[in-house]
């Protein structure tokens, strides 16, 4: 009887997960397009054979635009273009389920549930932009990196990342630094990374010829304005890091507008969890697997390098550009609850349920348009406490 009950509960959980995944995403498919998404639509008019880097149309790297063009042709304009990212999200979850065998089934279940219900994941899985594709390719490459599988697939995904988003360059550099730290850079791997670096420089050179890209860098540190660096800039980025790992990586953009009691408590709760994880790591380091330590180091590296690129005026820190790195954050959170479960399964489930409950409230408020207190063009700025009282 116990076996049958657990089996039914498992199937019920899978059904609910699938239902919530599609429900929270499909109901928002027809929300108004915003500026950047309109750029993605405009690229459909361009023949990539004649303008492969979409000069005078977009300053972003082109891989997602290629996929959008293909998807538009195959769907015969019958499908909402935003459904492309829903397809990528489904592929991401399936890939993790099938290939991330270096984490326990319990942690994998928590990780997948976080991806299904995380408001920021939901938002970018229905935004016609490249961020979800960047995350998927990072997840695929990270699997090969963790397994030290430096086959052609590893290098192909790195090449695809070079054409996906500028944040992917940060991940590539972080993976290279990590292998250097671990002293696992053989001569062959170093040469491959060298050519990946040259290829990245080549792509950046081509994109720099885009008039829009040139204009956007006129006032950056790359143009020589290094005098703008101050201690205050560094301090602000460190404070922003706290906001990123407590609010942004959960709720997305405009987190700085959410100043209510519910999110204040949530923020403190996440801070306690992260302090707990750090304490477990410090005092129980020997109980951490090589992968768990690797993930922590990679996360620290991508966050540090993101702050550096902000200080250099290359790419802002704390915005949508760092969304692809949220996956490493979710790995840490799911790993924390797995560590707690080794001490008390009940405590792990209760603590995890608190995060999921807030996610569910937030997502449900959006799905039923309970957002009279927020502009329709700013769906991520939902204030949970006001939504509850609405």
Image (spheres, rainbow, N blue to C red):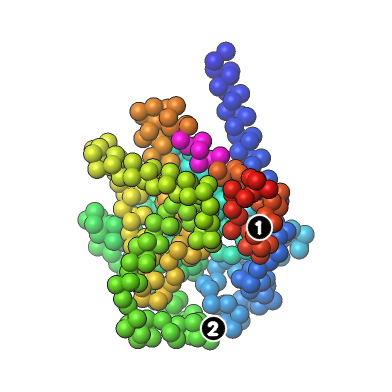
Residues 357 and 330: in front is: 357
Q: Can you tell which quarter of the image residue 65 is in?
A: bottom right
Q: Crowdedness of circle 1 by 10 Å Cα count: few (<14), some, many (20+)?
A: few
Q: Earlier in the sequence, mark 2 or mark 1?
A: 2
Q: Position of residue 60 (x, y in %)?
A: 53, 73
Main SS class of the magenta portion in the image = helix
Q: Is residue 32 left or right of residue 231?
A: right
Residue 131 in view (yes/no): no
Which circle marks residue 212 in the picture?
Answer: 2
Q: In the image, is residue 354 part of the stretch drawn in magenta?
A: yes
The residue indicated by pointer 1 is 373
Horizontally, residue 73 falls left or right of residue 319, namely right
For the point 32% across and 69% down, which residue is it? Answer: 234
Q: Secondary structure at mark 1?
A: loop
* Quarter where residue 15 is shown: top right
Residue drawn at x 50%, y 41% as measured from the top left: 355
Q: Which residues are magenta?
A: 351-357
The vertical placement of 285 against 190, above or below, is above
In the rendered view, tell whether residue 184 sits above or below residue 73.
Answer: above
- Residue 293 visible in this rendered orientation of the protein: yes
Mark number, residue 128: none
User: Are the residues tagged 2 and 1 within 8 Å (C-beta)?
Assistant: no
How many tags in the picture? 2
Q: CA distance from mark 2 to mark 1?
A: 35 Å
Please state the horizontal and vertical placement of residue 347, each as a whole percent of the image. 42, 30
- Residue 220 in percent (x, y) is at 41, 81
């Amino acid at each position: 009887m116990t076996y049958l009950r657990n089996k039914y509960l498992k199937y019920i959980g899978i059904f609910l997960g699938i239902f919530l995944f599609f429900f929270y995403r499909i109901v928002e498919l027809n929300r108004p397009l915003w500026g950047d998404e309109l750029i993605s639509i405009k690229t459909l008019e361009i023949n990539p054979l004649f303008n492969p880097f979409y000069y005078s149309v977009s300053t972003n790297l082109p891989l997602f635009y290629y996929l959008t063009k293909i998807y538009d042709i195959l769907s015969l304009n019958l499908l909402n273009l935003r459904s492309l990212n829903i397809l990528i999200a489904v592929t991401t979850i399936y890939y993790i389920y099938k290939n991330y065998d270096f984490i326990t089934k319990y942690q994998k279940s928590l990780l997948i549930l976080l991806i299904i219900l995380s408001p920021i994941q939901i938002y970018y899985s229905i935004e016609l932009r490249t961020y979800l594709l960047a995350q998927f390719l990072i997840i695929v490459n990270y699997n090969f990196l963790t397994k030290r599988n430096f086959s052609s697939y590893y290098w192909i995904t790195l090449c695809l990342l070079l054409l996906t988003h500028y944040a992917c360059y940060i991940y590539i550099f972080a993976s290279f630094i990590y292998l250097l730290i671990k002293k696992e850079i053989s001569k062959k791997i170093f040469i491959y990374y060298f050519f990946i670096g040259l290829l990245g420089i080549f792509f950046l050179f081509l994109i720099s010829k885009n008039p829009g890209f040139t204009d956007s860098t006129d006032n950056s540190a790359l143009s020589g304005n290094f005098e703008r660096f101050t201690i205050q800039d560094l301090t602000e980025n460190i404070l922003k890091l706290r906001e990123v790992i407590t609010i942004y990586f959960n709720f997305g953009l405009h987190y700085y507008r959410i100043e209510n009691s519910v999110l204040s408590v949530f923020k403190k709760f996440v801070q306690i969890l992260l302090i707990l994880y750090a304490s477990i790591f410090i005092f129980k380091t020997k109980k951490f697997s090589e992968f768990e330590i690797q993930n922590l180091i990679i996360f620290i590296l991508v966050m540090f390098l993101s702050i550096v690129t902000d200080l250099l005026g290359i790419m802002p820190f704390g915005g949508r550009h760092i969304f692809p790195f949220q996956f490493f954050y979710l790995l840490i959170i799911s790993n924390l609850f797995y560590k707690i479960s080794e001490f008390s399964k009940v405590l792990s489930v209760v603590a995890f349920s608190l995060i999921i409950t807030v996610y569910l409230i937030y997502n449900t408020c959006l799905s039923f348009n309970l957002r009279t207190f927020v502009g329709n063009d700013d769906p991520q700025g939902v204030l949970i406490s006001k939504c509850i009282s609405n």
